[in-house]
Amino acid sequence: MINAAGTYTMVGGSRMSEQTLADMAEAARSHVDIKELQRKVNQRLAEITQNEAAAVCNGAASGMYVAAATCVAQKTGEPFNCLSMSEIGEYEIIMFAAHRNPYDWSIRQLGVKLKEVGYPNTMHVTTADDLKNAINKKTVGIFFMYSNRGGWIAEGGLDLETTLRVATENSIPVIVDAAAQVPPVENLWNLTQMGATAVLFSGGKDLRGPQSSGLIVGKKDFLSTFTEINFFNYGIGRMLKTGREEIIGLLSAVEQYVTMDHTKRDTWVEDQINNLIEFSKSSEIYDIVRSFPNEAGQPMARAEIRLKTSDLTLDQVSKSLKEGSPSIFTIVDRGHLFINPMTLFEGETELIIDQLKIIETKNKQAHIL
């Protein structure tokens, strides 16, 4: 299958480079002291992402789970494994109502309370005082869903700068969920340099590491407690296994990502979009235009397929692309169909154009008959 939609988990996120695959295969051939491997890899990840500390986790969602436990442990001053469920349930994590989403389960299943602030709209604009008034002696952290404008997150929450200022004034850690927020590569260090306690990224999205990996970067004190709770220690971290292959695979992928020529990649993406636009100029049914930003609010363009005819729907086009050979995966999102080059390899845009031509030919023949 050619993934023309983006780094969606349902189709495996992204594809690892040959270098990453080779490094993972090498890791699989040997036994290793996992704790020592984690220590050295985490140190190296911190260096290349310009952070005080870093750690590999079993995906961004499990990273949120362990981060929530870290907030509780640091608030109580007790090892997390010593706390009962009733004790954990006494503490609260604050989120803006506009930031609530299905990934909340990674926090809720820990047993802490989620306290909402504001609304998922701008009918009543959330203020710094709203956040300040929500903080009490049971507050252990603020979880912030980060995205550039144009992404999935609804309006209604405070901006990150204001959130960090209020949190700092009240000595509350801020955990930023930025799972899909690279590109830009600078987010690997910009968000922590702004003052975030910790920031989570998916390893299997644009970082192009293993799907079952995540990267957390942040302050040394917080990450020290995080690693004590995380795999392979007994307790909640034990079930979040991250093998030596994933640990090495993520390091390899991040090493490559921070040294990548991102400007060259952006140029390649624009070239693919232009190829699709040029094709549509001679088409009787397609009108393809450039769209910016992409579905996650990342600063990368994509192509939107519009139809000049009522004889065909976007859902039918998407279904036909998936049923073609090769199978091409796309998503019709709120009435729009996009081709996202960020997950394409060289030559695959041409294969997509070929499939679009086949669909147009079949549509024309059906109406002639």
Image (tube, grey):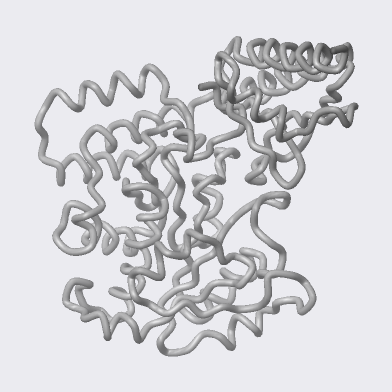
Above-or-below relation of 94 to 267: below
Residue 220 vs 19, above or below: the answer is: below
**Residue at screen point 58% across, 22% down:** 323
Residue 329, image quadrant: top right
Please give the name of the residue rendered at 32% of the width and 39% of the height, measured from the top-left corner: 44
Q: Nearer the viewer, residue 35 or 304?
A: 304
Asked if residue 57 shows in the view, the reply is yes
Q: Where is 204 relative to 113, above or below?
A: above
53 sits to left or right of 318: left
Looking at the picture, tell me which residue is in the foreground, 340 or 75.
340
Q: How many marks?
A: 0
> Which residue is rendered at x = 20% and y = 27% of the image?
27
Q: Is residue 68 above or below residue 252?
A: below
Query: From the image, which quarter does the C terminus lie in?
Result: top right
x and y percent of residue 177 in the render? 50, 56
Residue 207 appears anywhere in the view = no
Between 117 and 188, the one lying in front of the other is: 117
The picture quadrant where one finds residue 109 is bottom left
